[in-house]
Amino acid sequence: MSDRYRALRQGDVMHGRSEVGVPALNFLAGGGEMGALIRSHDWVSTPLGEPEAWPQPLKTAVRLILNTGHPMYVWWGPDLLCFYNDAYRRTLGPERHPRSLGERGREVWAEIWHLIGDQVDFVMAGRGSTWDESRPVPITRFGRLEEIYWTYSYSPIDDETTPNGVGGVLVVCTETTQSALAEQRRKAEAERQRLLFEQAPGFIAILSGPEHVFEFVNQSYDRLFDRRGFVGRTVKEVFPELQGQGVHELLDAVYATGERFVAGAMPVRLRATPEAESTDRFLDFIYEPMRDEGGAVTGIFVEGYDVTERVNAQAGLHDAEERYLALFNGIEQGFCTIEVAFDNSDAPVDYRFVEVSSSFERQTGIENGAGR
């Protein structure tokens, strides 16, 4: 070990200096904790030897990573000796920091070499660089295997003195674990909601844009409206028979104003098939505007029920009541129904005329609801 490098190591360790005071070693200046560790490391016992004799591309790479706030890592030489900066140190556990500094990369990262080894070899062979976005690369840190995601690139550090022209690999990375897991949770929640919508008893559709393009329909919607191949088509394309019935105008108004529309037993004329005659249907439904993060309307959520049978049943009951009243009031003889109340001795104590026919009222003067 040279006297200058020995003095550098001893002075840095004893006095916490970040300035090296040796022009040939200025590339090691600064760098916080990792700068100090690199300056104090026994490089003479490694294949690299004294830092002042390192290849210039390595000096440049080390200088680069020590003076940036972005997590960076370097593998250098045939043994892929490891260098990293303070920002990268914060992603490591005690399993690799600080012992991995200056160690062989294949040994330090043995547990994930089956995932990254081919990429490192690709770069070292002079074949280019790599890029991965939010890739899962689980590592052991703080005593347990963690599911960790990284966005990273492996880039060649050029060195004309090597056979392939590449002396090492520069790793520029960002840990994206929190955002990746959040995205997974978002997708899982979206899938859960999709399944709930899919199985809902009422019909559901999601329309996007001012043209009201179908993005989603559930099973009830698909069955009710004749499986017309909705997704990717506009409401006007799927339901041409709605033209002139005010439905398209309602959708336009909800999209333009952002105001919800609620309909109860709204009559529409629909075709069971494109070739069939239109029939009357009655629908309860809601048009709910959907908004982006800025509050702008981006689409319409549709939910409702086909209440045709209920409306028809109510109409039939009303007709039956009308016929009954006509028959009841048409009887010439007086006719009435009486509701009688009894006490505990079964003696009548009160009564009320529930229904009286017109002739009974004329004959007696007693009206509906009369009693004593």
Image (cartoon, rainbow, N blue to C red):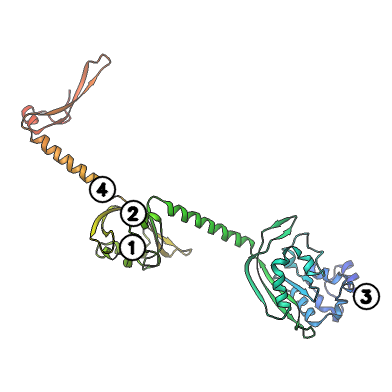
Q: Secondary structure at mark 1?
A: helix
- Give the spatial CA distance, label 4 vs label 1: 24 Å
- Give the spatial CA distance, label 4 vs label 3: 97 Å
Residue drawn 71% across and 81% down?
Answer: 126
Q: Amino acid at mark 1?
A: Leu
Q: Left of 173 or right of it: where is 251?
A: left
Q: Residues within 10 Å of mark 4 (few under 14, many from 20)?
A: some
Q: Left of 215 or right of it: where is 281?
A: left
Provide residue 279's location: percent of width, then percent of height.
24, 57
Q: Amino acid at mark 2?
A: Phe
- Give the spatial CA distance, label 3 vs label 1: 81 Å
Q: Residues within 10 Å of mark 2 (few under 14, many from 20)?
A: many
| Mark nearer the N terminus (4 vs 2) | 2
Q: Left of 268 or right of it: where is 148?
A: right
Q: Secondary structure at mark 3?
A: loop
Residue that numbered label 2 is attached to: 285
| Mark nearer the N terminus (3 vs 2) | 3
Query: Could you say which quadrant of the image residue 132 lies in?
Result: bottom right
Mark identifier at residue 311 = 4
Provide residue 334's location: percent of width, then percent of height.
8, 28
**Up-down: is 110 above or below 144?**
below
Provide residue 174's location: percent of width, then percent of height.
66, 68
- Which quadrant, please, contains the N terminus? bottom right
**Up-down: is 259 above or below 45?**
above
Disc 4 versus disc 2: nearer the observer: 4
